[in-house]
Image: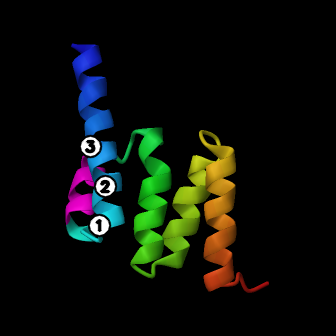
């Protein structure tokens, strides 16, 4: 049962990634909402927020993802900061 649940989550994350790439943000959001507590989804949640123009939410997701996928999260965070520089 645990294995099938894991596959289900992986399938949602992979499908959401495909939806983000194809521009179907609405379906990606529905899929990611189901797995938002799964740390493997956090970078995708950040990308989705960024593409929707919610830069602060994107930063929050990427910062959260630093503990799981530090290189990817750091690169995504740097990209967001290019488009929306942090005010100091």
Left or right: where 44 falls relative to 35? right
Q: Which residue is mark 3?
A: 12
| Magenta span of residues | 27-34
Question: What is the CA distance from the residue labelled 3 to the residue labelled 2?
Answer: 10 Å
At 67% from the left and 60% from the top, the residue drawn is 75
Question: What is the CA distance from the residue labelled 1 to the residue labelled 3?
Answer: 15 Å
Considering the whole magenta stretch, tell me its main secondary structure: helix
Q: Which residue is mark 2?
A: 18
Judge whether 29 appears above or below 50 on screen.
Answer: above
Label 3 SS: helix
At 50% from the left and 53% from the top, the residue drawn is 43
| Mark positioned earlier in the residue sequence (3 or 2) | 3
Quarter of the image with the C terminus is bottom right
Q: Is residue 8 visible?
A: yes
Mark 1 vs 2: CB contact within 8 A: yes
**Image location (x, y in percent) of residue 9:** 29, 35
Looking at the picture, tell me which residue is in the foreground, 39 or 16: 16
Label 1 SS: helix
Q: Which residue is mark 1?
A: 22
Query: Crowding near pointer 2: few (<14 within 10 Å), some, many (20+)?
Result: some
Nearer the observer, disc 3 or disc 2?
Answer: 2
Mark 1 vs 3: CB contact within 8 A: no
At 39% from the left and 78% from the top, the residue drawn is 52
């Amino acid at each position: 049962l645990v294995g099938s649940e894991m596959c289900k989550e992986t399938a949602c994350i992979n499908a959401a990634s495909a939806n983000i790439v194809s521009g179907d943000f609405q379906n990606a959001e529905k899929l990611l909402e189901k797995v938002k507590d799964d740390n493997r989804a956090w970078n995708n949640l950040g990308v989705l927020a960024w593409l929707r123009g919610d830069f602060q939410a994107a930063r929050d997701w990427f910062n959260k993802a630093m503990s799981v996928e530090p290189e990817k999260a750091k690169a995504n965070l740097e990209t967001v900061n290019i488009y929306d520089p942090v005010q100091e």
